[in-house]
């Protein structure tokens, strides 16, 4: 197995490391992780039994696949630090939505093999959705293990980089939308007599079950919605109220706002 290096040991790095190990995609000895936070490295080493270091250069020198799992504003400093010591055939994985392949290549000042990815936070429970875009000098054989890695923490979709904006709105940011929906449902449950704990648990399981039903049946969402809406019944009354309050348009407008904001941030990098 190739040596896998993580520069940055935050939650997403931990999710990927845990997913790979649990799925058998990689073993503990395949992985090395760096971070400036000694306490975080101690946690990662204890939980996943992987090699850790405070040296980004050590990770870059020894790794065949390098995950840049740091905040976008740190990318310039990290790339400046490692660009002269990475292996010539190393794959570098971008884990930041605001950093383009072109911008990263310019920072490396070399024909480095770059793959841009965008996993969302449910990757932390192996139920993530990751967009992947490989630079033109990455071969299908080189991309295959990257797909395997990210499939170990959920599902993947290969997209052109120009569609990462709408992917961000539909997957990267949407856990926040879902949490808001569940919270509002729970508020309504409390209003009608449920405890807060009961209302959150019921709403969460209902939303999880609906998503799983849609995924496993492959039916159109409208078909499954109609199956719940008995003529003259309670559900269609609720659906009509959603429509009257502009529920659908609010979601589309939110996705538009998220997509537009992504593009503005991308222009800054």
Image (tube, rainbow, N blue to C red):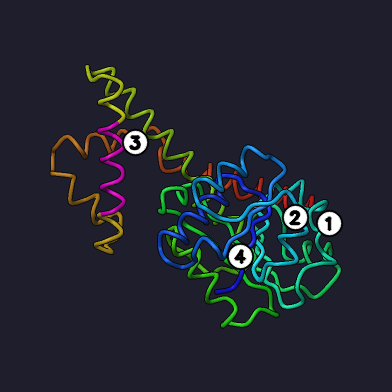
Q: How far apart are marks 1 and 3 (CA)?
A: 52 Å
Secondary structure at badge 1 equals helix
Q: Horizontal and vertical percent for residue 69?
A: 65, 53
Q: Earlier in the sequence, mark 2 or mark 3?
A: 2
Q: Name the residue under label 3.
A: 242
Q: Mark 2 points at which residue?
A: 56
Task: State whether residue 83 is above or below residue 43.
Answer: below
> Which quarter of the figure is the N terminus placed in?
bottom right
Which quadrant of the figure has residue 244? top left
Q: Residue at x 76, y 46 (%)?
A: 73
Q: Name the residue under label 4.
A: 4
Q: Which of marks 1 and 3 is in front?
A: 1
Which quadrant of the figure has residue 134? bottom right
- Residue 30 or 121: which is nearer the viewer? 30
Q: Which of marks 3 and 4 is nearer the N terminus?
A: 4
Whether the residues at callouts 2 and 1 have beta carbons within 8 Å, the answer is: yes
Q: How far apart are marks 4 and 2 (CA)?
A: 13 Å
């Amino acid at each position: 197995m190739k040596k896998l290096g993580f520069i940055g040991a935050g939650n997403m790095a931990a999710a990927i490391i845990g997913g790979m190990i649990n799925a058998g995609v990689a073993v503990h000895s395949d992985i090395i992780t760096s971070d400036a936070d000694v306490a975080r490295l101690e946690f990662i080493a204890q939980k996943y039994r992987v090699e850790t270091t405070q040296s980004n250069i050590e990770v870059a020198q020894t790794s065949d696949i390098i995950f840049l799992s740091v905040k976008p504003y740190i990318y310039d400093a990290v790339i400046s630090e490692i660009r002269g010591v990475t292996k010539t055939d190393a794959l570098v994985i971008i884990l930041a939505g605001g950093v383009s392949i072109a911008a990263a290549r310019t920072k490396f000042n070399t024909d480095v093999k770059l793959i841009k990815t965008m996993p969302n936070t449910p990757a932390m429970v192996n139920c993530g959705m990751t967009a992947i875009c490989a630079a033109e000098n990455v071969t299908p054989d080189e991309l295959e293990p990257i797909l395997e890695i990210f499939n170990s923490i959920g599902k993947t979709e290969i997209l052109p980089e120009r569609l990462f904006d709408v992917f961000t709105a539909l997957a990267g940011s949407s856990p926040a939308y879902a949490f808001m929906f569940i919270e509002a449902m729970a508020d309504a449950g409390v209003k009608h007599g449920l405890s807060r704990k009961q209302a959150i648990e019921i709403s969460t399981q209902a939303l999880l079950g609906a998503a799983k039903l849609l995924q496993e049946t492959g039916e159109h969402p409208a078909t499954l919605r109609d199956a719940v809406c008995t003529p003259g019944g309670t559900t269609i009354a609720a659906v009509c109220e959603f429509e009257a309050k502009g529920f659908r348009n609010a979601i589309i407008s939110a996705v538009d706002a998220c997509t537009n904001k992504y593009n503005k941030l991308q222009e800054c990098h």
